[in-house]
Image (cartoon, rainbow, N blue to C red):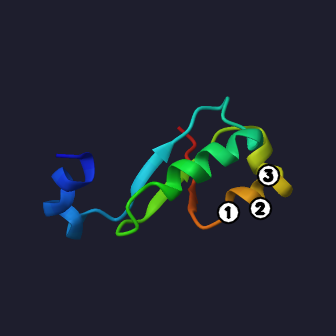
């Protein structure tokens, strides 16, 4: 049984799945993120937490990141 099937009974209580990326994951790695997200079930929503500084520079990297997913930031 896969991860999402095991959590299916909790679907009404799960707002979104949150993906936390390391600070080394930068704009050049976005194609890998898109590939990963495209392979996930469409029945759920996903948030992505990024830490690479280029994603916060209000430039092209931030715009590319906002493609079809919610960005989640944390100040922890």
- The residue lying at 66 percent from left, 35 percent from top is 25
Q: Taking 52 as reference, is 19 left or right?
A: left
In this view, 22 is above or below 4:
above
Name the foreground residue: 65 vs 1. Answer: 1
Q: Can you name the residue that lies furthest to the top here?
A: 24
Asked if labels 2 and 3 touch by Cβ distance under 8 angstroms, the answer is yes
Asked if labels 1 and 2 touch by Cβ distance under 8 angstroms, the answer is yes
- The residue lying at 80 percent from left, 43 percent from top is 54
Residue receiving disc 2: 63
Residue 8, position as x, y percentages in the image: 19, 61
Residue 57, position as x, y percentages in the image: 83, 50
- The residue lying at 13 percent from left, 62 percent from top is 9
Residue receiving disc 3: 61
Q: Secondary structure at mark 2?
A: helix
- Cα distance between the residues tagged 2 and 1: 5 Å
Residue 20, position as x, y percentages in the image: 50, 41
Could you say which quadrant of the image residue 69 lies in?
bottom right
In this view, 22 is above or below 2:
above
Q: Can you name the residue that lies furthest to the left here?
A: 9
- Cα distance between the residues tagged 3 and 1: 9 Å
- Cα distance between the residues tagged 3 and 2: 5 Å
Q: Secondary structure at mark 1?
A: loop
Query: Looking at the image, can residue 23 be seen?
Result: yes
- The residue lying at 60 percent from left, 53 percent from top is 34
Residue receiving disc 1: 66
Could you say which quadrant of the image residue 68 lies in?
bottom right
Q: Secondary structure at mark 3?
A: helix
In this view, 51 is above or below 39:
above
**Circle nearer the N terminus (3, 1):** 3
């Amino acid at each position: 049984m896969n991860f999402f099937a095991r959590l299916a009974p909790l679907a009404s209580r799960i707002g979104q799945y949150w993906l936390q990326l390391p600070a080394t994951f930068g704009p050049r790695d976005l194609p890998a993120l898109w590939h990963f997200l495209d392979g996930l079930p469409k029945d759920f929503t996903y948030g992505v937490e990024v830490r690479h500084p280029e994603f916060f520079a209000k430039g092209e990297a931030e715009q590319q990141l906002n493609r079809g997913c919610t960005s989640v930031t944390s100040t922890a």
